[in-house]
């Protein structure tokens, strides 16, 4: 559980920064300005036009962050930081495999 809390506390800032930058850049697009000129409400512009265009980079960032979190958890458990999880993870496999690497020398 500690790892999950750690990942949440350290991972949200980059996600927020990327989503905010994407929404600010979409706000300046010509088609958004045209919708405002036609009198379309801000709610409709935001949810029907800006949000679908901004969700792609957010999904990609979540996907890549998930892989990064798996690697972080593996490295932390490899260096024998204690995990609250009782199941085996990749770091424990790597620790067990080091005795075979030393044997092969």
Image (tube, rainbow, N blue to C red):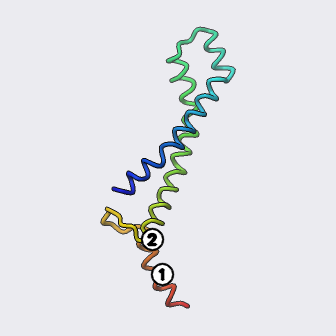
- Please tell me in which quadrant of the rendered image residue 87 appears: bottom left
Which residue is pictured at 39% across the width and 53% down the height?
4
* Horizontal side of residue 19 vs 95, given as left or right: right
**Disc 2 secondary structure class:** loop
* Position of residue 75 measured from the top left corner of the image (x, y, whole percent): 48, 66
- Which class describes the residues within 10 Å of circle 1: few (<14), some (14-19), or many (20+)? few
94 up-or-down from 17: above or below: below
* Position of residue 35 measured from the top left corner of the image (x, y, whole percent): 62, 14
* Position of residue 77 measured from the top left corner of the image (x, y, whole percent): 42, 67
24 up-or-down from 77: above or below: above
Quadrant of the drawing holding the N terminus: bottom left
Which residue is pictured at 38% across the width and 51% down the height?
5
Q: Residue 32 bears which disc, if any?
A: none
Q: Compare marks 1 and 2 and give the one earlier in the sequence.
A: 2
* Horizontal side of residue 82 vs 39, given as left or right: left
* Position of residue 50 measured from the top left corner of the image (x, y, whole percent): 57, 26
Residue designated by label 1: 98
Image mark count: 2
Residue lying at the far right in this picture: please name it. 30
**Disc 1 secondary structure class:** helix
Which residue is pictured at 51% across the width and 56% down the height?
67
- Give the Cα separation between the discs numbered 1 and 2: 12 Å
Quadrant of the drawing holding the C terminus: bottom right
| Residues at discs 1 and 2 in contact (Cβ within 8 Å) | no
Residue designated by label 2: 79
């Amino acid at each position: 559980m500690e790892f999950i809390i750690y990942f949440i506390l350290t991972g949200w800032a980059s996600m927020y920064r990327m989503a905010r930058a994407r929404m600010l850049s979409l706000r300046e697009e010509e088609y958004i300005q045209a919708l405002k000129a036609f009198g379309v409400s801000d709610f409709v512009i935001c949810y029907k036009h800006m949000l679908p265009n901004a969700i792609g980079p957010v999904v990609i960032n979540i996907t890549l962050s998930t892989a990064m979190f798996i690697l972080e958890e593996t490295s932390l458990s490899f260096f024998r930081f204690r995990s609250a999880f009782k199941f085996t993870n990749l770091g424990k496999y790597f620790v067990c495999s080091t005795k075979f690497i030393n044997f092969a020398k």
